[in-house]
Amino acid sequence: MLLLLAGSAPPFTPPVLEGDPSPQTGLEAALRGAFAATEAFGAWPPGAWRVRLHLDSAAFEQATGAPPARSAQWVGEVLHLRPWEQLCRRPLGTILRHELTHRRLQAKGLRRWSEEARCLWAEAHLHPLKPWPPAPARPLQERLDRALAGGTTQEQAWAYHWLRAWLKGEESPALPRAPHREPELWKREALTATEPATEPGAGAVTVVWPAERLRGPMVVNGQRLSHRMGHTWRFQGRVRFPKGFPVRELRGRVALRAEARGWSLAWTANRGTWIAAATEGELGPEAPLEARRALAAVLGRWLEGHGLQHPGGLLCPLTHCAVVRGQPTAATVRAAASAPALDLDPRWAFFTGSAGGQSLSPRAVWGEGPADVGTAAEVPGDRWQRWERSLSAAQVARLKQAVAPGLRQGQSGLRLGSSGPYAVEDLRLAAGRAFGWTAWPSNACEAELQPDGSLLLRGRGWGHNAGLCLATASYRAGQGASAEQILAEAFPTSWRTP
């Protein structure tokens, strides 16, 4: 047990905990222990700090730009953490001691490699190493800094291996060959990483996982691929990936390209397979059959109206298009194949994670389309039925800089003090990109500017609140409703094909 002597250090001031509320008691206890364990590495800086426990890895990586192997990362005064169930599979105390040491050292002006070495040491030691080993030559320090700041997966692994060996006084690993670096814009990756969608049959769909999502060693069908920059490996048929990889199995055409910071993966399959994969990715394989049939019907229409989401007619496996986690189960393939015909204008074929019992129209969200709303039941136990968030004055100021005021006809908006109105959809997306996707969960909300400039938000749902509510679909299917009934309730007649 770790004990603090009276008067030896400032008392632990709990951070503001944001995001997933369920494990916050356990998280605060773990933070308290890490705080005590790292006090010898430096004074805790004054001022408020926050810890955001993300609900999914995509939100964590969107907020931080961190690779899949990283569990936590500071962005300003906010410590971002991966979802709780993932943290619990890793040494949480080690992770938090490492990150809290970073905060204690932030004002010391250490070089990146030197600060990282001290954080690695703090993972398992209560006091700094005395004396520290002699510093490496300046060219090597610069190489370590570059690798830690933004090197390839191979370079970062080498840097951490080198630092651990340096701390232990062991022989250091050899430097990896300097890689050829390329720009990593998503559009460039998507266009260069894939071949044309030539899957047999009309309507083939290509989904691209950009390289920042797939870092680390690449193992396919039990064979490790060498990271030869710019080289593309192509597979046909059944393609399997190891446990822990974002995708376990894909069937169809798979192209893997070695990029500067990881691997881009392009999967080409027929239209029906993508619909089934997206249905299962959004709802999960255990969702009621009728809910899966309903979502598959919507996705089929959505694909007709929104299939060109990215350059070259490509899709991504994220919520921007529809979540894809891998090859769908046979049961979901059958459910998608039996989806009812949906007389719905493909422009309005939307779905949302949870409406929280309050649906919105396309007109209210985007300022175009029908103004009528469907129905969405209040789902017992739905964590998004009601929510409350607070944005600081600095965050409000940042949103005002990022979002232009002005509304389209019929579009829902909010005023931020004397400025605005701003479109709620634009504010929500800007907040998600800047502060994490749980910072402003949905469009159905009210806002109240506080005297200190902060913004109090109260709302319902998760997402834009328009179209088929997935929480309602599963709930109604569990009550015995058919897919046809679920769709009729979700989409008013004014949304149908003209």
Image: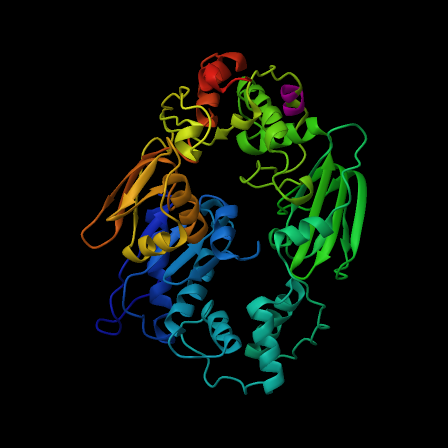
Position of 259 with respect to 294 (left or right) is right
For this rendering, which residue is in front, 362 or 209? 362
Residue at horizontal 78 percent and vertical 57 percent from the top: 231
Q: Residue lying farthest left?
A: 451
Q: Is residue 299 left or right of residue 479?
A: right
Residue 264, percent across and down?
Answer: 68, 51
- When the figure is inspected, residue 23 is found, relative to residue 251, above or below; the finding is below
- Which region of the structure is painted magenta? 332-336
Q: Name the residue located 74 percent from the left edge and 53 percent from the top edge.
A: 257
Whether residue 243 sits left or right of residue 256 in the image: it is left
Colouring rule applied to residues = rainbow
Give residue 81's position: percent from left, percent from top: 44, 53
Q: Position of residue 144 (x, y in %)?
A: 59, 76
| Count of all numbered marks drawn on residues in the image | 0
Location of residue 482 with respect to 211 vertically, above or below: above
Q: Quadrant of the N terminus?
A: bottom left
Question: Where residue 168 sits: x, y (%)?
Answer: 57, 77
Q: Is residue 462 above or below residue 397?
A: above
Establish if 69 lies above or below 271. below
Does the segment drawn in magenta span residue 457? no
